[in-house]
Image (cartoon, grey):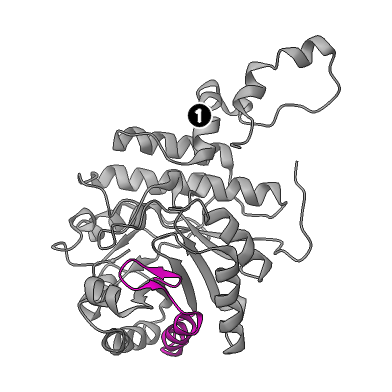
Amino acid sequence: MSFGIAGLPERVTIYEVGPRDGLQNEQARVPTAVKAEFVHRLVGAGLRVIEATSFVHPKWVPQLADAEELLGLLHGADGVRYPALVPNERGLERALTAGVDEIAILGSATESFAQRNLNRTVAESITMFAPVVERATAAGMRVRAYLSMCFGDPWEGPVPVDRAAQIGVRLLDLGCAELSLGDTIGVGTAGHVTAVIERLGDCGVGPDRLAVHFHDTYGQALANTLAALRCGINVVDASAGGVGGCPFAQSATGNLATEDLAWLLQGLGIETGVNLERLVETSLWMAAQLGRPSPSRVVQALRPSAALGREHLKWPAAGPRSKSQRAEPEEDEQELQPPSHQRDC
């Protein structure tokens, strides 16, 4: 059952970052074959944009050292995109050789994080990205820009709205098609999100060129997503099972879980093309590979039902019941109550 809110997008693209942003922070290396199976299961769940890997130097993010091997294992599918993160021109060379047709760069709204993540100032990082974007677009690649620390920085504190908007505009001016606003340490709130998006609008950047990337450190990711949707954003980043973080900002805990996002959007009547049952099954499978439970609230709530089969992954049927029935809720109903970097990130 869905209940829409006036003014929200009719359809949202979920930009799945689990295979890259999710797995980059794992202590143990995930086998390449497991990563490939993860991606294929995500495709089977209906996701059509899956950021598969990063061409960062293995010294900095050894978990993603198998980028070329992984891409060679991925099956092409109609309408499915496999973007990859590139840190610099060397990373772009590897991406071009691997046949990648869509890339992302990652900048910072703050000087502290730019130094820790890129070993450069903000201005120097933008200078570094300029030839990457120019060469990529000349080769027919679509380029996305991530902007980290848009709302808060563990070393500098709250980030001024004008600062985030200014750096975002500079990245887009390089020739990027899309800017993803990142709440890297999860401190953003709905009003702050709205203010940044509106300030970008004042600078001539409409919601059609923006995406959002929230971490759920303070439990604000879904509230912030709804605020972004109200501003017209229709691309939202998420990580299956809620896995992920940033190796270079210890405050950056898990990403917004794709299942939690899908549950929200389904309840709002917004189309995503995602099959929630298959997505939950995929995250349960991946959690088993990682040896720990998924932090996603929706995965946790639906896990008992997933073990019983997809027919149980539904809301209980509505309708009047007798007093005796109300006194003893059915087992399925109890289970299905909704819960009350480059070095790259």
Screen quadrant of the N terminus:
top right
- 200 with respect to 137 (left or right): right
| Foreground pick, 106 / 123 | 123
Residue furthest left in the image: 59
Any magenta on residue 167?
Answer: yes
The answer to whether residue 270 is above or below residue 200 is above
Residue at x 39% of width, y 70% of height: 149
The answer to whether residue 32 is above or below residue 252 is above
Q: Say which amino acid is labelled 1.
A: Arg
Residue at x 43% of width, y 39% of height: 283
> Picture coordinates of residue 225 (x, y %)?
58, 60
- 12 with respect to 161 (left or right): right
- 153 with respect to 112 (left or right): right
Residue at x 40% of width, y 34% of height: 285
Q: How many marks?
A: 1
> Picture coordinates of residue 231 (x, y %)?
66, 71
Screen quadrant of the C terminus:
bottom left
Any magenta on residue 331?
Answer: no
